[in-house]
Image (spheres, coloured by chain):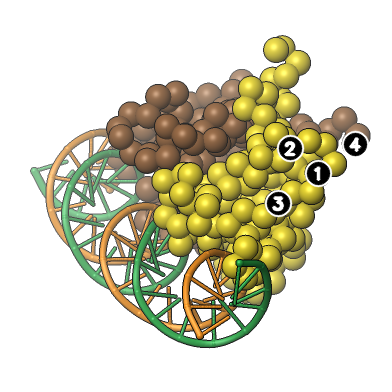
Chain colours: A yellow, B brown, C green, D orange
Amino acid sequence: MLRLTKRTEYGLIALVHMAELAAARPPGAEAEVISARAIGDIFPVPKRMLAEALKHLQQGGILESTRGVRGGYRLSRPADQVSLGEIVSALEGPPALTSCAGMGAATSEGSCEVEPVCPIRSPLARLRTGIWTLFEGVTLQALADRSADPTGLFSATG
Amino acid sequence: MLRLTKRTEYGLIALVHMAELAAARPPGAEAEVISARAIGDIFPVPKRMLAEALKHLQQGGILESTRGVRGGYRLSRPADQVSLGEIVSALEGPPALTSCAGMGAATSEGSCEVEPVCPIRSPLARLRTGIWTLFEGVTLQALADRSADPTGLFSATG
DNA sequence: TCGAAACAGCACTATTCTAGTGCCGATTAA
DNA sequence: TTAATCGGCACTAGAATAGTGCTGTTTCGA
């Protein structure tokens, strides 16, 4: 039901935490790495799952990893240059909304039987784009700023 | 991964079909009912699942049902007065986005361990509202109008 | 009155997805 | 050399999804 996975949830928690750490640092200071263990000690989440999420974020280019004893992760870019779309995409792959209406315009495999006469392919594809646009417009910075409206949809009224 | 269920997919197909039938009728004419079997004959979807979806839509007040031999379903309201939010809500319940950040502000049960220190509860709740606002803004009429942009996000530019 | 068409409700199975865990290897600072 | 840490593979258990079966109820029409 339009739900994010736990892995995404844990990844977001870690990212927001890193963004908050970054916000507390003096400007220009290099971001120190933080280990998966350290994050897991702060938040009561399964450490193993958290590590899984962090790994995906590293593979998605959102985090940089350092191995070895004093190793860990840090943001590869400032928080205001990381979109929620990127994050979700890294953690659970590009969104589909339906099985047939993926990112690619054409059906890759002969998966959908309805496709030749499907009346909702095109509308749902555009809807997916709309949701994705919403996600792309939300930055990690906005997520970390707890008092603000991350979507920007309601900022006009207050 | 932010995916709609098949049941929702089938329900949407049926609804869009009904909306297209309605659009082809002379204005003011009463909508005739169409049976689940008839819809299933048009689109190659599992008839049983389709019937399930239609039943949910009836329970959600979006469709009216008539039983008996010449029975079937029809829209209980004009297509431009039915929102996608209603439809999805009827077919798969209110959206949650995460397990803890449901519609209700407070956690109903002691479900989420992270909640006391969770840095993403509030941002995700607002994000969910944003998605829902998007869904509420899309009408069945807009979905049935294949050439148009159902979200309205891109209509300004053309 | 009877039968067929159609909705309504319950229960069941199989498959897929999700959540979580275990283990071992590679890397690196101390 | 040791311990901390990331990295990758595989595995289990539980939940959700997809789909089917069966029976009951309503209603039209012969």
Q: Residue B158 carries which label?
A: 4
Considering the numbered disc 3 on the image, is that residue within a helix, a strand or a loop?
Answer: loop
* Mark 1 belongs to chain: A
The kind of residue on which mark 3 rests is Glu
Please state the horizontal and vertical placement of residue B150, each as a whole percent of the image.
72, 37
Please state the horizontal and vertical placement of residue B7, each as a whole percent of the image.
45, 50
Q: Distance between the residues labelled 3 and 2?
A: 10 Å
Quadrant housing the C terminus of chain A: top right
Q: Which residue is drawn at the image coordinates 59% and 32% (left, top)?
A: B123
Can residue B70 be seen here? The reply is no
* Mark 4 belongs to chain: B
Of the residues tagged 1 and 4, which is closer to the observer? 1
* Mark 3 belongs to chain: A
Pointer 3 with pointer 1, Cβ within 8 A: no
Residues indicated by labels 2 and 1 sit on the same polypeptide chain: yes
Please state the horizontal and vertical placement of residue A116, each as a whole percent of the image.
66, 63
Q: Which of marks 3 and 2 is nearer the N terminus?
A: 2
Considering the numbered disc 1 on the image, is that residue within a helix, a strand or a loop?
Answer: loop
Residues indicated by labels 2 and 4 sit on the same polypeptide chain: no
The kind of residue on which mark 4 rests is Gly
Which residue position holds label 1?
A29
Towards the viewer: B10 or A91: A91
Q: Distance between the residues labelled 2 and 1?
A: 7 Å
Q: How far apart are marks 2 and 4 (CA)?
A: 44 Å
